[in-house]
């Protein structure tokens, strides 16, 4: 079963809220977050740190790294 969560972040003084789909994955969870019309998958690697994965074959402008880092910071606090 898939759930949806709201992720509030503040980057450079701008507050934004991102919607993420939460999926059970391996031995944990992964988050599929729409960041500026790009679905970014956030999942933990073997060391337990979050990694951001862009869709396969994506060749457009990558989402802002600072924005992704702010989203990861919120997820780490859960």
Image (cartoon, rainbow, N blue to C red):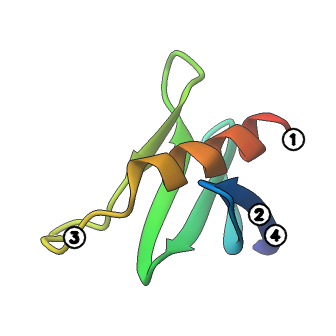
Rounded to the nearest whole Å, what is the CA distance between mark 3 and mark 4?
Answer: 25 Å
Rounded to the nearest whole Å, what is the CA distance between mark 2 and mark 3?
Answer: 22 Å
Q: Which mark is in front, 3 or 1?
A: 3
**For this view, does 45 lie left or right of residue 76?**
left
> Residue tagged by mark 2?
7
> Residue tagged by mark 3?
61
The reply to whether callout 4 and callout 1 are in contact (CB within 8 Å) is: no
Q: Earlier in the sequence, mark 2 or mark 3?
A: 2
Mark 3 crowd level (few <14, some 14–19, many ≥20, 10 Å Cα): few
Secondary element under disc 3, as helix, strand or loop, is loop
Q: Is residue 76 in view from this perspective?
A: yes
> Residue tagged by mark 1?
78
User: Vertically, is 23 above or below 74?
Assistant: below
Q: Earlier in the sequence, mark 4 or mark 1?
A: 4
Tell me where residue 59 appears, x and y as whole percent. 12, 71
Q: Earlier in the sequence, mark 1 or mark 2?
A: 2
**For this view, does 38 lie left or right of residue 50?**
left
User: Vertically, is 4 above or below 13?
Assistant: below
Q: Residue furthest front?
A: 13
**For this view, does 6 lie left or right of residue 63?**
right
Mark 4 crowd level (few <14, some 14–19, many ≥20, 10 Å Cα): few
> Residue tagged by mark 4?
5
């Amino acid at each position: 079963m898939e759930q949806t969560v709201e992720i509030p972040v503040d980057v450079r003084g701008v507050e934004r809220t991102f919607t993420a789909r939460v999926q059970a994955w391996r031995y944990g969870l992964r988050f599929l977050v729409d960041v500026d019309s790009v679905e970014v998958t956030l999942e933990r690697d073997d060391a337990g740190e979050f990694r951001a994965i862009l869709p396969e074959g994506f060749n457009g402008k990558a989402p802002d790294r600072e924005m992704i880092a702010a989203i990861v910071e919120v997820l780490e606090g859960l």
